[in-house]
Image (tube, rainbow, N blue to C red):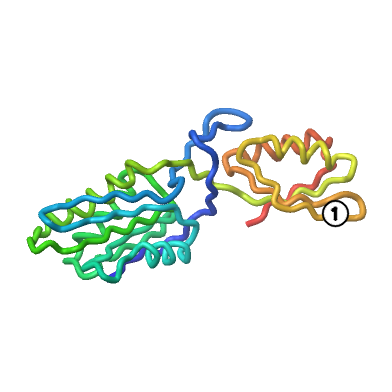
Amino acid sequence: MAHIGLQGWPHLRRAGFPLAQGMLHGPMVARLTLVGVTTIRQEIKRSRFVAVAGPIADEEAARDFIAAQSDPAANHNCWAWRLGQRYRFNDDGEPGGTAGKPILAAIDGQELDGVAVVVTRWFGGILLGSGGLIRAYGGSAAQCLREAGKVPLIETLSVAITCGFGDLALVGARLGALPGVEISDQAFTDTGAVLSVSVPKAEADDIARLVTDLTSGRAVIGWND
C-alpha cells in the first residue's frame, strides 16, 4: 500500500558542490539531493537486498525512477521518495510499516530532498520478523544514501527584468557571473529586452538592489509567483 503526504513543496533547483555560499553576503543553508544514481547490494540471512537511490525533480520523475529500478522477478520492490513537504512510500507486500517507511526515514535522517530510493528483496527462505525487516530496508537505504554523492538544493524565485539596450549587456554580464543565478530567456523589445531569471530566494532582495543600482533605477523588476 502506498502512502503520500499532500503538502505543497517549493520550487527547488540543484546547484554546484560544495554547499553554495551567499553571493552577496553570508552562507546560504540548503538541503541536499543526490548527484546521480547509486546502488549497493547486501545479503541478510540469505535474502538479497539491492538499494538504488537517485535524484528526482517531480512526481513523474519519481514514478519513472521506481519503474526503472524495480525488478518484476523479485519478491518485493519497496520504495520511498521525498520532494519538499511531499512524500510517498510503499511496502510492496511486506508487513505494513516495515519497508517503505524505514526507507523514507533514511532519506529524512540524512536531510535529503528531491530523492527516491528503491530497495528490492529476493527472499532467501528465512523470515526476518518486523524488526529485522525495518533494519534491513532502512539500513540498506541508509547505506546507499551515505555512499551517494550529494549537492545542495537551493530554493529559487523567478523574476522578469526589463531593461533598455544601454543597460542590457552590463546587467546580463553581472547576473551571469553570480553563482546560483540562471538567465533562462532573453526576449527583445523595441527598447531593450526582458530577461527571465531564476535567483536563489535568500538572495532575491540583494539581486534586486544590484539590478536597480546598475541601471540607476531604469530596470523594471517583476517577481513571478
Across and down, in percent, residue 104 comes to 30, 55
What residue is drawn where x is 33% and y is 48%? 108
Which residue is at the front of the view, 104 or 10? 104
Residue furthest to the top:
26
Above or below, 119 against 15 in this view is below
Say what amino acid the circle numbered 1 marks: Phe
Above or below, 65 against 181 in this view is below
What residue is drawn where x is 65% and y is 48%? 198
Residue furthest to the right:
190
Which residue is at the front of the view, 208 or 12? 12
Residue 200, image quadrant: top right
Which of the image's four quarters has the N terminus? Answer: bottom left
Residue 98, image quadrant: bottom left
Across and down, in percent, residue 204 comes to 64, 41
The residue identified by callout 1 is 188
Above or below, 9 against 96 in this view is above
Across and down, in percent, residue 5 comes to 37, 62
Above or below, 5 against 182 in this view is below
Across and down, in percent, residue 219 comes to 81, 44
Q: Is residue 8 left or right of residue 175?
A: left
Which of the image's four quarters has the C terminus? Answer: bottom right
